[in-house]
Image (cartoon, rainbow, N blue to C red):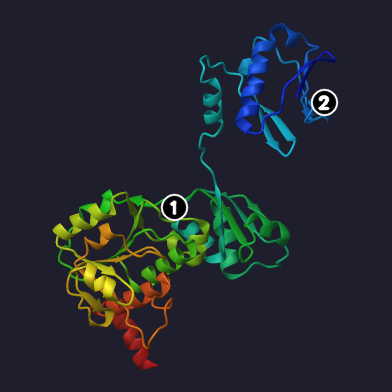
Amino acid sequence: MRHRTGGRASGTRKLGTHVGVWEATILAWVSGCGQSLSGDSGQFVLREGSWWGRPTGPLQPSVSGVPGAAGAMRLLRTVGCFGCLVVRHFSRVARPGGEELSRLLLDDLAPTQRLERLFGLSPCLLALRAARRRVARLLLQAGKAGLQGERAELLRVAEERGIPVLRPRRQKLDALCGYQVHQGVCMEVSPLRPRPCDEVAETSPGDDPQQLWLVLEGLQDPRNLGAVLRSAHFLGVDRVITSRRNSCPLTPVVSKASAGAMEVMDVFATPDLAGFLKAKAQQGWLVVGTVGCPGPEISQSSKVPVTSCLEFLWDRPTLLVLGNEGSGLSQEVLACCQMLLTILPGRHLPPGLESLNVSVATGILLHSICSQKKSSPIQTEKGQLLQDT
């Protein structure tokens, strides 16, 4: 790498092989140049050096007119990729001290409030109805004459709220949505975060013995999480609790997999799942874990009884706990369970097929429990409707 001032080369330095080496080299050089970079004619041009230090040609862009006294305060960050250098400016604000470089890099990577693209007809429509997100703009695929049904409602609600509406072509919308199935609808919205579990930690069982909360430990696949939320909402689960550690966030993919159920559900998160379960057990809740087909390793390592989901009697407020897709429940959470439920297979299974997908298992478990729920006005109405047909 050569330094050129007023058209005259002033030395050669070996090009570093790591981004941090390049940044430190440039900062040290700019700091020590002093008057050589002063004046309007001073220029700073980066050249790629060969293995023998000979210039092979200038790299663009060049930075002109960098004052020597302020050179260290205008750090140039260089990113290298097989001889390709990109130069850009940082802030002019002076920060004295030996940690100047690290501070500037941290400031540059400071988190900012970002929007995400929610896609799919149901997620976007339910998000608009729930009004829990800030909507920056609505994107409806161009070329579909005469919007009808739910798409027409989307457009109407957006116009009522003053939300800008764009009509990009299909190819553009595909790229914006990461080539997901968007159904011609996309919205730029603020992220949706789980609510803190402190809001429900003190909830007592009350007079209703048939309360059911779904607790998820370490679910990481967004489509699994979305399918679980959809089943929980459909079957009438009262609350959904997730572990804050090693769990999938509430992303647009989760919302699409849940058919928009994520947009209308209250999902809570706790940093201490085991502590939460212990506290709820002391309040009178039944903590029920889940396992695959019971084997010798379960019966020998745990004194907790394992019961088929078809034999479970739902007569008290219950927390149903499901674990990670691969490893299941952790030992710490298993120790908090008062009972373990399992789904018995209908045939002898070869190794590797002893368990179900977590979202499928959740649907079966929830249905076996929620089918015991005492008749509600909605269920009575549906039962009467089935009899009439």
Residue 47 image point, x, y percent: 79, 27
Outermost front residue: 52
Q: Which mark is residue 54?
A: 2
Q: Amino acid at mark 2?
A: Arg
Quarter of the rendering occupied by the C terminus: bottom left
Q: In terms of depth relative to the viewer, which is nearer, 299 or 132?
A: 299
Residue located 35% across and 84% down the image: 345
Residue 354 in the image, given as x and y percentages of width and height: 39, 78
Q: Is residue 129 visible?
A: yes
The image position of residue 316, as x and y in percent, is 17, 70
Q: Is residue 373 visible?
A: no
Task: Kindly indicate whether the residue at mark 1 contacts the one at mark 2 (C-beta within 8 angstroms).
Answer: no
Q: Residue at x 23, y 67 (%)?
A: 301
Q: CA distance from mark 2 to mark 1?
A: 60 Å
Residue drawn at 32 percent across, 63 percent down: 329
Q: In the image, is residue 220 above or below residue 30?
A: below
Residue 225: x percent and y percent?
43, 63
The answer to whether residue 50 is left or right of residue 206 is right
**Which residue is at the front of the view, 236 or 30?**
30
User: Residue 367 sits in which quadrant?
Assistant: bottom left
Quadrant of the drawing holding the N terminus: top right
Residue 175 placement: quadrant? bottom right
Circle 1: element type = loop
Horizontally, residue 285 falls left or right of residue 232, namely left
Q: Of 123 and 49, which appears nearest the observer?
A: 49
Label drawn at residue 230: none
Residue nearest the observer in this picture, 299 or 307: 299
Q: Secondary structure at mark 2?
A: loop
Q: Which residue is mark 1?
A: 132
